[in-house]
Amino acid sequence: MQSADDTHAKQPRVLIPEAKLQQRVSELAQEIMHDYKGREIIAICILKGSFIFFSDMIRKLDLPVVCEFLGVSNYGNRAVSSGEVKITLDINEPLENKHVIVFEDIIDSGLTLSYIMSTLRARKPASIKSCALLLKTENLKTNIDADYLGFKIAKEFVIGYGIDFNGRYRGLPHIGYIEHDH
Ligand code: IMP
Ligand code: MG
């Protein structure tokens, strides 16, 4: 019988190596600095999966940045998004008249980020944009588009660089995937 521990014992394959991630993070930070020159931004980290991407990004942003954290969970630990999102930790800062950028790890169906963006839009920011590390192009169910995007990937289940499988693998410095037996 297969358990989560058997899966964990498998060495994940590298999909995006560390150097390529770091290079892209620098490029995204440059784009954001160019677009937001002279303005303060409220950078919102979507917990938990974005915490490493977020911490790398904000250290590269030479702008006044206020960091906020929004905890969301898709119900359960399913690999397929239900589209039902629960806010587990809300931000403290009012967003009214602020320039907001939301940092998300992955857009898969797009339902999570759509829900987050419409929830935050209701708080009347001066502007709001999204920055996603990964976009799975094959599963999109909404017309959501990240304003800043790291990489487009196939529908492979990925882990590492903050992203988990049942809470594991977040500490890997690269984006990997676990090969399944067919
Ligand atoms: P969506 O609502 O279908 O766009 O799903 C987005 C959320 O599902 C992401 O924020 C992740 O938390 C999770 N997710 C989607 N694909 C993966 C994956 O390949 N690995 C780990 N988590 C994933
Ligand atoms: Mg997530």
Image (spheres, grey):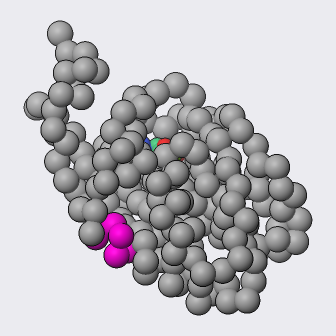
Residue depicted at 46% across the width and 70% down the height: 149
The image quadrant that residue 138 belongs to is bottom left
Residue 129 visible here: yes
Q: Looking at the figure, which quarter contains the N terminus?
A: top left
- Residue 56 spot, x, y in % from top left: 48, 64
- Residue 7 spot, x, y in % from top left: 22, 27
Picture layout, residue 80 above or below residue 162: above
- Residue 85 spot, x, y in % from top left: 63, 37
Number of dots carrying numbers: 0
Q: Is residue 78 left or right of residue 113?
A: left
Residue 155 visible here: no
Give the main secondary structure, helix, strand or loop, of the magenta stretch: helix
Residue depicted at 73% across the width and 89% down the height: 38
The image quadrant that residue 8 belongs to is top left
Q: Looking at the figure, which quarter contains the C terminus?
A: top left
The answer to if 47 sits in the magenta stretch is: no
- Residue 97 spot, x, y in % from top left: 88, 71
Q: Which residues are magenta?
A: 20-24
Residue depicted at 69% across the width and 34% down the height: 88
Picture layout, residue 129 above or below residue 164: below
Picture layout, residue 88 above or below residue 145: above
Query: Furthest residue to the top?
Result: 1
Q: Is residue 53 left or right of residue 86?
A: left
Query: Furthest residue to the left?
Result: 182
